[in-house]
Image (cartoon, grey):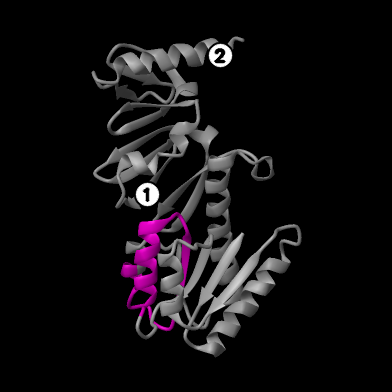
Amino acid sequence: MKIVICDDSREDLKKVENLLAGYMRTFPGEKFAVEKFSDASALYDRISRNDLADIYILDMIMPEKSGIDLGSLLDKVGKSVIVYITSSDDFALEAYGVHAVRYLVKPVREEIFFEAMDYAVSYVKAVWNSLHGEASYREARYPVKTKDGLVSVLYSDIEYIENASRILDIHLTDGSSIKSIFIRKSFDEEIREIVKDRNFARVHKSFLINMNHIRRLTQDSCFMEGGRNIPVSKTRAAEVKKEYLLFVSEQYR
């Protein structure tokens, strides 16, 4: 897992490096690679060439290129995770605008930093697992960016996902739900990885369902175990029926 730190203050850069070293010592079996930048413009050029890390720990206020400049570029080119560390809390809203998972104000306490890194690392592992299915990361998880930070949800715990006014509402099998922050990408993009899982079917422009939790399927509706009646669009009805019949047949092989 590759981590980049960027801060124009070499003193603060060293402090973050020490915090990160302490965090990495708590995971002796994990492989981390760390790179440091005191020049945000140099890092901006690196990102522009699509040379990306998994996690970026960025100062917010820097000359020439700010942390928001870096975050905006990252938001366009990849799935990297951003943790902001800054001397001012005036830019918190902007930080969430580029989907940072945490916004930490200096001086940062070790326990706060460790909690932020736990979120960041869990996100990276969730994405890796959905892409590669590596046994080392166990069951796939769906990362959800909420107003309180990143929440990583097991695929098996999801009953369905609804896109309501560009906010994802993830309904879980225990009856609870998790709401995302406002999504800037399309619903198609947000579910691009999870829809590759054969348990899930896109039944409507606004709904993705876990077929394990269908109680009954009709031409125009999915009746879910949790009690929700989810619409099936006319354009998808035939494909949904085919997917569900295949899914059911595979359960009895």
Splitting the image into 4 quarters, where does residue 45 fall? bottom left
Residue 250's disc number: 2
Left or right position of 32 against 127: right
Q: Amino acid at mark 1?
A: Ser
Left or right position of 112 against 202: right
Task: Measuring from the top left, give residue 134's x and y in whole percent.
Answer: 64, 41
Picture residue at 35% right of the left edge, 19% below the top: 222
Picture residue at 43% right of the left edge, 15% below the top: 244
Query: Which residue carries the number 1 mark?
Result: 180
Residue 177's place in the image compared with 92, above or below, is above
Q: Is residue 98 visible?
A: yes
Task: Measuring from the top left, give residue 46's x and y in whole percent.
Answer: 46, 70
Picture residue at 46% right of the left edge, 39% below the top: 193
Which residues are the magenta region?
A: 65-94
Q: Are marks 1 and 2 in contact (CB under 8 Å)?
A: no
Which class describes the residues within 10 Å of circle 1: few (<14), some (14-19), or many (20+)? many
70 in magenta: yes
Left or right position of 119 against 76: right
Q: Nearer the viewer, residue 163 or 235?
A: 235
Task: Measuring from the top left, give residue 232's x and y in whole percent.
Answer: 29, 21
- The residue sitting at the front extreme is 49
Picture residue at 54% right of the left edge, 70% below the top: 4
- Disc 1 or disc 2, which is closer to the eye? 2
Mark count: 2
Splitting the image into 4 quarters, where does residue 195 fall? top left
Q: Amino acid at mark 2?
A: Glu
**Distance from the alpha carbon under mark 1 to that under mark 2:** 33 Å
Q: Nearer the viewer, residue 150 or 229?
A: 150
Quick one: label 1 or label 2, which is nearer the N terminus?
Answer: 1
For mark 2, give the secondary structure. Answer: helix
Residue 94's place in the image compared with 129, above or below, is below
Task: Measuring from the top left, give residue 148's x and y in whole percent.
Answer: 43, 58
